[in-house]
Amino acid sequence: TNPERIEMKKHCARDNKHTMHRETK
């Protein structure tokens, strides 16, 4: 498990939240 991947996943989750909100709107 690379720390970079964990950070990427965290960023992905944040992006997903924003994308979801934007798509919902």
Image (cartoon, helix red, strand yellow):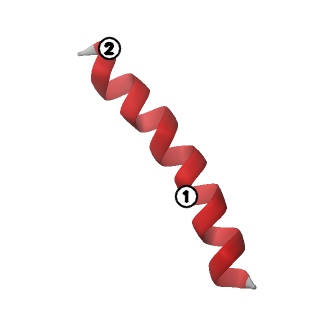
Q: Residue at x 54, y 53 (%)?
A: 15
Quadrant placement of the C terminus: bottom right
User: In this image, 13 relative to 5: left or right?
Assistant: right
Instruction: Name the residue type under label 1.
Output: Asn
Q: Would you call the spot at circle 1 few (<14 residues within 10 Å), some (14-19), or many (20 or more)? A: few
Q: Secondary structure at mark 1?
A: helix
Check the image and report above or below for 19 versus 11: below
Can residue 8 be seen here? The reply is: yes
Instruction: Give the residue pinned by disc 1.
Output: 16
Q: Is residue 16 above or below residue 1?
A: below
The amino acid type of the residue labelled 2 equals Pro
Secondary structure of the residue carrying tag 2 is helix
Residue at x-position 46% and y-position 46%: 12
Q: What residue occupies the far left of the structure in this picture? A: 2
Does any portion of residue 1 appear in the rendered image? no
- Image quarter for residue 3? top left
Image location of residue 1, percent across then percent down: 24, 15
Residue 5: image x %, image y %?
30, 27
Looking at the picture, does residue 8 appear above or below residue 6?
below
Rendered residue at 55%/58% (across/down):
16
Quarter of the figure with residue 22: bottom right
Going from N to C along the chain, the mark reached first, 1 or 2, is 2
Residue receiving disc 2? 3
Q: CA distance from mark 1 to mark 2?
A: 20 Å
Please tell me whether residue 6 is drawn above or below residue 2 in the rendered image: below
